[in-house]
Image (cartoon, rainbow, N blue to C red):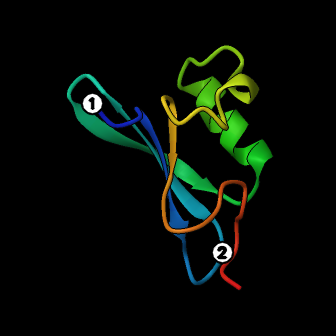
Amino acid sequence: MESAPITVHRPSPSGGRRVSVHRHGRDEILGLAFSDTDLRVFLEAAGITDPELILDDPAWVEWRGADAHRWNVD
């Protein structure tokens, strides 16, 4: 099985999580998200019409290094 096309990477020590999308055979960094709102904005800019519907779908989004929707290191 292929991995999800969208990856939300582990939280950085300074806060936020890098977001990348795999398309056209390569990974593209969309930005550093500090909230679900930031993540939705990045995904909409990448062409996803209703990102809210896919945030918790592991076929679309892989959350690495921390629980989903968690944006800071505790």
Q: How would you rate the neighbour count of disc 1 (Cα within 10 Å): few for under 14, some for 14-19, many for 20 or more?
A: few
Residue depicted at x 71% and y 63%: 70
> Considering only vertical position in the picture, is 68 above or below 52?
below
Residue 24 percent location from the top left of the image:
25, 22
Mark 1–mark 2 Cα distance, whole angstroms, equals: 31 Å
The residue beneath circle 2 is 15
Mark 1 vs 2, N-terminal side: 1
Dividing the picture into quarters, in which one does residue 35 lie? bottom right
> Considering only vertical position in the picture, is 40 above or below 74?
above
Residue 45 percent location from the top left of the image:
60, 26
Residue depicted at x 71% and y 85%: 74
> Considering only vertical position in the picture, is 10 above or below 29?
below
Labels 1 and 2 touching (C-beta < 8 A): no
Q: Which residue type does callout 1 highlight?
A: Met
Marks 1, 2: nearer the viewer: 1
- For label 1, the SS is loop
Rendered image: mark on residue 1 = 1
Residue depicted at x 66% and y 37%: 56
Going by the image, does 44 lie left or right of 36? Answer: left
> Considering only vertical position in the picture, is 16 above or below 63?
below
- Residue nearest the observer in this picture, 18 or 8: 8
Q: How would you rate the neighbour count of disc 2 (Cα within 10 Å): few for under 14, some for 14-19, many for 20 or more?
A: some
